[in-house]
Amino acid sequence: MAIRYELIHTCKQSGARYGLLHTPHGTFETPIFMPVGTLATVKTLTPEEIKEVSDGLILGNTYHLWLQPGEDIVAAHGGIRGFMHWDGALLTDSGGFQVFSLTDMRKIKEEGVYFKHHKSGESLFLSPEKAIEIQEKLGADIIMSFDECPPSDATYAYTKDSLERTLRWAKRGKDALKSDQALFGIVQGGLFEDLRTYSAEKLIEMDFPGYSIGGLSVGESKKDMYRILDHLNPVLPKDKPRYLMGVGSPDDIVEGVIRGVDMFDCVLPTRNARHGTALTTQGKIQIKNKQFEMDFSPLDPGLITPISKYTKSYVRHLFKAEEILGMRIMTYQNLAFLKHLMKEIRQAILEDRLLDYKKEFFKQYGYTK
């Protein structure tokens, strides 16, 4: 097995899990947040900086790397790791989410998905087998089954049909796998609890080394997302990792961990950083606001990092002057903050006080008014 999950401790107060994820490129404490390196780069940061602000496990995007530069060029470098000079562990998605986001440009059939290139308009085809083949060439430690992510407002009938096809695709992808990469099954089923149970049980029968929870954070309410996670928590196997796809706001991470999630990823912390929003130990701030023009304190007085030497006033100036360094500093800050948050969460689980930690953190962060 290319990876192994070891459950070390369950928080007596919340039921949250602390564990170790053993991979060919390192062992990682969970819960863990994984920065997104869509095109073999976490935007604006060098691999050396990514190492400083992550726990050593990051994501690459199958769809985007397939289109540019192409999986064969990445493979010729020895996979994403050689391509970007990354010596940590890697996870790749399957391209399934792009199928969801390119609604106007695609046709979903039993054999796979026909769609047009989002820039050139060129005709493309992605199947479960093709998604596995591309991911094998990209060379990540953990790879994903090809799935369809239905919209959150899809009908029961549509969601059920989509789910049945996604299960057939999961089986086809598993049969196509030639490498020893760890292929995760993706639990779908929209906001319907019975479909979520059915999806999870069928994937568990196929015996994947880990299970992803897809189709959340796609427009539904937080209440609905937490309801589905509550529902899946007792259904998913205790001895396998659970990965909540595309979720990365601090409140959702804490709530997800309480509901049994081990792994998170999201582009939001880095995307918001490039627009001037900082995640800090004292709450969220928009650095372009005039109040920071003469603020000589560091971005985050509660977190000592290599960027602590820059004042809010200076970082605001960089954004107002449209200097790229501003985006770099802010991206570093947001990922450093999430690394810090995950460490605090893991400590709270080990000390059986995660619900107390949530209460303190939400109050400090302004989630509870």
Image (spheres, rainbow, N blue to C red):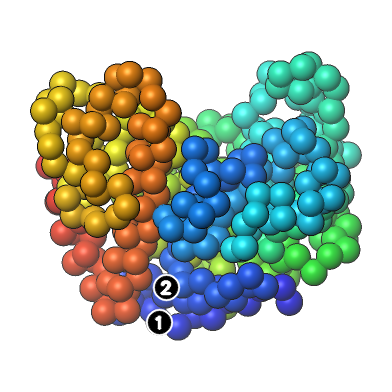
The residue at which mark 2 appears reads as 17
The quadrant holding residue 154 is top right
User: Which residue, as the protein is rendered here, is positioned at the far bottom?
Assistant: 8
Q: Quadrant of the C terminus?
A: top left
Dot placed on the residue nearer the N-terminal end, 1 or 2: 1
- Residue 336: x and y, percent? 36, 53
Q: Residue at x 39, y 33 (%)?
A: 325
The quadrant holding residue 352 is bottom left
Q: Residues within 10 Å of mark 2 (few under 14, many from 20)?
A: many
Task: Find the distance from the CA under tag 1 to the CA under tag 2.
Answer: 6 Å
Do the CB atoms of the residues marked 1 and 2 lie less than 8 Å apart?
yes
**Viewed as shown, does residue 326 lie left or right of 25?**
left
Q: Decide which of 106, 365 is in the foreground and name it.
A: 365
The quadrant holding residue 268 is top left
Q: Residue at x 16, y 59 (%)?
A: 360
Q: Decide which of 20, 201 is in the foreground and name it.
A: 20
- Residue 361: x and y, percent? 20, 56
337 in relation to 149, above or below: below
- Residue 85: x and y, percent? 65, 54
- Residue 266: x and y, percent? 49, 45
Q: Residues within 10 Å of mark 1 (few under 14, many from 20)?
A: some
Please indicate, yes or no, whether residue 368 appears anywhere in the rendered image: yes
Q: Secondary structure at mark 1?
A: strand
Q: Secondary structure at mark 2?
A: strand
Disc 1 marks a residue whose amino acid type is: His
246 in relation to 184, above or below: above
Q: Residue at x 29, y 43 (%)?
A: 279
The residue at which mark 1 appears reads as 9
**Viewed as shown, does residue 6 lie left or right of 147?**
left
Disc 2 marks a residue whose amino acid type is: Arg
- What is the total number of numbered labels drawn onto the structure image? 2
